[in-house]
Amino acid sequence: MKVAAACQRLRHDPRRYARLRQLCIPRATHGTPVRNFFSFGKEETANERGGRRGASVPPRPPMAPGHVSPRRALPANSPVVKPNYADTGKLPPPSPSILLHTPESIEKMRAAGRLARKMLDYTCSLVRPGITTEEIDRRVHDAILASGAYPSPLNYWGFPKSICSSINEVVIHGIPDDRPLQEGDIAKFDISLYFQGVHGDNCASVGVGEVDAEGLRLMTAAKEALQAGIDACGPGACLSGIGSAVHAVADKYEYETVRAYSGHGVGPALHMRPFVLHYRNGERLPLRPGMIFTIEPMLLEHGPEVTTWADGWTVVSKDGGRGAQFEHTVLITEDGVEVLTLPE
């Protein structure tokens, strides 16, 4: 395996990476879980360009928390195999090492990825003006269980629902509620599930009815950024190359790339090493065959700063600028990269 020259010059620093892991993995603090799935423990402050602040966007009311119904329980006789946190909401300490998947594990990841993509496509097919994200969550919850899988977000550090639904300026980790989707919304749905002992994870943005030109452009940029990140992958390539490729697309469109949240390894645990930054960075970790991780850039149309609502989960842009996100799970192979969450 040929290692990229940049990775040879400056290898990955395990001490710095250990610090990133401490900041990224949700964990209990004085008995209260840090509820964001994957945060680097800081708000966005870098890159003061501010995105396309002059772009014309139709006025709309800001997003606000809606009513969240009680968490759904699995039927008592359900044959679905649950992950280790399903009943308690608590996770064991994360592994300090990067998992190189075996051929058997890779086949399980392929199956989980295909099913996660099928559920994501089903989720997007439900989108229309007037439907609530609560109703979408209910239908997708039932569909995932009927497929023999468990919805990964459900009770993950206490998360109350089976999918994440993030609308307009809600960037990630939005909780499905009773707000009806409205014409022109940009809806992000993050669908992950636990199947045959491993997790599949993917996300897409979809327009609700007629979306303005700037919103369509933002979604196009986010999809292009994801593809650029995938194209930067391969055996011997640098992990940092993914962030550089994503950032270049954000620059081209004059948008911002979120720095406080990242992609991640995935397998028996939903969030594992390596952590995949979506901006230019110095993580010189050579990619190796058998690594499986997500690439999930989040682009914002205005400034880069984000904050979290009082629910401890919902991450929004501080200035109200909308966000778009697409996500795939990828496998590093002997001769390239394989996307595990493509549609069949």
Image (spheres, grey):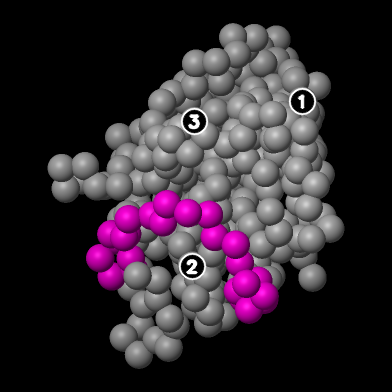
Q: Which residue is mark 2?
A: 268
**In the shown orientation, is residue 68 left or right of residue 198?**
left
Q: Amino acid at mark 2?
A: Pro
**In the shown orientation, is residue 144 left or right of residue 232?**
left
Q: Position of residue 270 (x, y in %)?
A: 48, 59
Labels 2 and 1: the sequence-earlier one: 1
- Which of pointers 2 and 3 indicates the residue nearer the eye? 2
The Cα–Cα distance between marks 3 and 1, rounded to whole angstroms, is 18 Å
**In the shown orientation, is residue 92 left or right of residue 117?**
left
Question: Could you tell me which secondary element the residue under label 2 belongs to?
Answer: loop
Farthest left residue in view: 30
- Relative to the observer, which residue lies in front, 112 or 306? 112
- Relative to the observer, which residue lies in front, 1 or 343? 1
Q: Residue at x 69, y 54 (%)?
A: 288
Task: Give the label on residue 260, or none.
Answer: 3
Is residue 211 shown in magenta?
no
Q: Residue at x 66, y 62 (%)?
A: 290
Q: Amino acid at mark 1?
A: Ala
